[in-house]
Amino acid sequence: MSLIPDRSSLTVAFAHGAYQFADAFGLRDTGIRHFQVSTPEALLPRMPEVDVLVVSFQWRDALLENAPKLRFVQSISAGVDQFPKDLLRSRGIRLASAQGGNERAVAEHAMGLLLSLTRHLHLARDQQAKRHWRPMIGDRTRREDELEGKTLVIVGMGRIGSRLARLAKAFDMRVIGVKRNPSTGAEAADEVVATEGLREAVAHADFVVLTCPLTPETQGLMGADAIAAMRPGAYLINVARGKVVDEAALIDVLSKGRIAGAALDCFHDEPLPAGSPLWAMPHVIVTPHSAGETRRYEANVLDILMDNLGRLWRGESELRNAVA
């Protein structure tokens, strides 16, 4: 028996302030009733209509108080730490993530940040704004660098981390993966170590890239001790979640020049507060949690949604990227 109504009776709600899901969904000519709202406040009064909700950071637990028909939540993002999984289960509401929908985008973003740090592209942009032509640099330690032979430590060897490893190998880098269960395979990495070996691994790194999900085990994983273990010439890149990093400890080592720099796409508080010292640090690149954003993202998420709707209609218990 299907958990959701048939196609002719189903209502899907999309909740996002930027992505144009309703337009993209309409072009698929599914015949499914759907609508989109841009704020949680606009969504709440319409929840009694909703059988399937496609949402990410506009989720509010209060939505459940007005959702008698809701049976499936498709997350727009790969991360699902914002959802009350136990509460959803208790109400018979299934939850699936969009894992895999942004693996190319995030891996490419991480590689772009890595290249920007290496080639000092962020500094060149700052100099361009000042109309300053930088002279050639005599001090070799201050010059742009090359990636061949550099060691990249990837923390989290899921789809994003594994894809990033393949990209890094194309630049002839040495790749060390850090994952909870290293026995499940090295993928494209030269070596894989368990999470317990994180500090030793980052001590050998020229670049540390975080691609792991936020879980109770990974919250604060890149803490003060792990950051302190990094080499003075190393860079930290975070395309995971802000709370994977001890942000105060990172700001401290960056302000004291104990590591070379950082490129950060996610933060403890988002938007990043205007008073954060990270904004003004010349050796830090800040991007606004945009690693997963591409022109193809709506289509990628809708592919996962339609796959899961098909499974629900067929009465299957296994969903793609099932969480609850």
Image: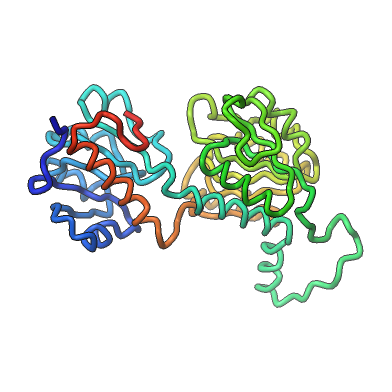
**Which residue is at 39% across, 56% downward?**
297
Towards the viewer: 128 or 170: 170
**Which residue is at 37% across, 39% downward?**
97
Q: Which colour assignment does the render follow?
A: rainbow
Where 319 falls versus 194 (above or below)? below
Towards the viewer: 256 or 261: 261
Query: Is residue 67 in view?
Result: yes
Task: State which quadrant residue 157 falls in.
Answer: top right
303 vs 31, left or right, is right
Residue 241 percent across, percent down from the top left: 51, 40
Towards the viewer: 288 or 317: 317
Where 320 falls versus 33 (above or below)? above
Residue 35 percent across, percent down from the top left: 18, 54
6 vs 96, left or right, is left
**Which residue is at 15% across, 37% downward?**
4
Task: State which quadrant residue 232 falls in.
Answer: top right
Q: How many marks?
A: 0
Query: Is residue 66 in view?
Result: no
**Which residue is at 18% across, 60% downward?**
29
Quadrant placement of the N terminus: top left
Q: Residue furthest left?
A: 9
3 vs 191, left or right, is left
Towards the viewer: 53 or 314: 314
Quadrant placement of the C terminus: top left
Residue 310 percent across, percent down from the top left: 22, 42
Task: State which quadrant residue 247 falls in.
Answer: top right
Q: Residue furthest right?
A: 138
